[in-house]
Amino acid sequence: MLWTVAVVGLPFVAAIALVTGCRHSGPRIARVATLTASILTLVAAAVLLQRSHEHVPIAFEWLPGAGTIGLALSSSSLWLVLAIAGIAALALLGDGEFDAPFRNTSWALIMVALSAGFAALLVDHFIARYVVLEVAALCAGLAPLAELPSGTAGRLVWRTYLPLRVGDAGLLVGILLLGEAAGTLNITLALEAGATLGGASLAFAVGGLVLAAWIKAAGWPMHLWALTGRRLSLSAHAVLFATLLPTLGLYLLYRTASGAGRAAA
């Protein structure tokens, strides 16, 4: 349980440190704190790989009858956590602008997005995944405000966030239809219950999930939100726009396809 909490919580702790104590302690301390959190996240994910396919229950039921929220330690999701955390650590090491005044805020958004993204990769409850995906998308949407002049940033915020919201709306439609069929929002059970859907319900459920995955993966013609990353620092572009959000989209597509495949079998 401790290692699981570390994977999700360490990037968030680093973000808090960046916007509080480290801001007054100088950029060197801020860089060390952020890099330490990234490396420890890598270590925690590597430890959890030895316990893959375990389920970590969280005694919390968000909505009555929707099922208990938990974390599923699958090897596929943990390898993705390892890869994303490694890319973040490399981006931090190579960030030559970390001493600039805006970088604390920018990296704080990156770390919050990583924390939400890792939770999305591990959580086995659709509503919980929807919420953390929203947090990650919001961080990407706010990134221009941290790095660019207000006039330019405002336009890019909407160009980034609105398409991602459209994808999340599709995701919400899909999961509500699956949840109605399954009687629970546990991801595995809900996807398996999708085989019982038919007609318009099946079309809307599949369409909503595919739309959400396609937009987050920056598939054409819904890729324009990802172009915002080219206007930002290399770190924000590499971690948020080129790695984290597309990976979350592709993983959603993978889970949807694999769940449907198991149900068909």
Image (spheres, helix red, strand yellow):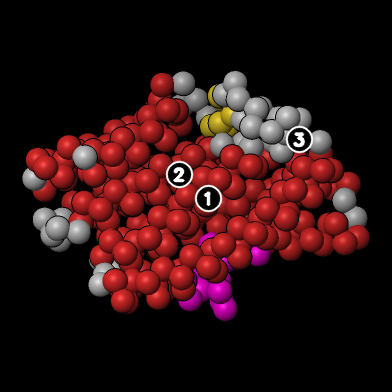
Q: Position of residue 46 (x, y in %)?
A: 38, 33
> Hey, what amino acid is under mark 1?
Leu
> Which badge, 2 or 1, is on the more N-terminal residue?
2
Tell whether label 1 touches label 2 (CB within 8 Å): yes
On whether residue 212 falls in the magenta region, the answer is yes
> Which badge, 1 or 3, is on the more N-terminal residue?
1
Mark 3 residue crowding within 10 angstroms, few (<14) / some (14–19) / many (20+): many
Q: Position of residue 91 (x, y in %)?
A: 25, 55
On the rendered structure, is 4 left or right of 145?
right
Quarter of the image holding residue 54?
top right
On the rendered structure, is 184 left or right of 9?
right
Q: Secondary structure at mark 2?
A: helix
Front position in the image: 51 or 166: 166
Q: Which residue of the protein is positioned furthest toward the right in this rendering?
A: 199
Q: Position of residue 73 (x, y in %)?
A: 54, 32
Q: Secondary structure at mark 1?
A: helix
Q: Which residue is mark 1?
A: 133
| Above or below, 143 relative to 83 | below
Front position in the image: 82 or 101: 101
Q: Which residue is mark 2?
A: 116
On the rendered structure, is 44 left or right of 98?
right
Tell whether label 3 touches label 1 (CB within 8 Å): no
Q: Which residues are magenta?
A: 211-225
Q: Residue at x 81, y 39 (%)?
A: 182
Q: Secondary structure at mark 3?
A: loop
Q: Which residue is mark 3?
A: 184
Q: Quadrant of the C terminus?
A: top right
Q: Position of residue 188 (x, y in %)?
A: 70, 38
Tell whether label 3 touches label 2 (CB within 8 Å): no
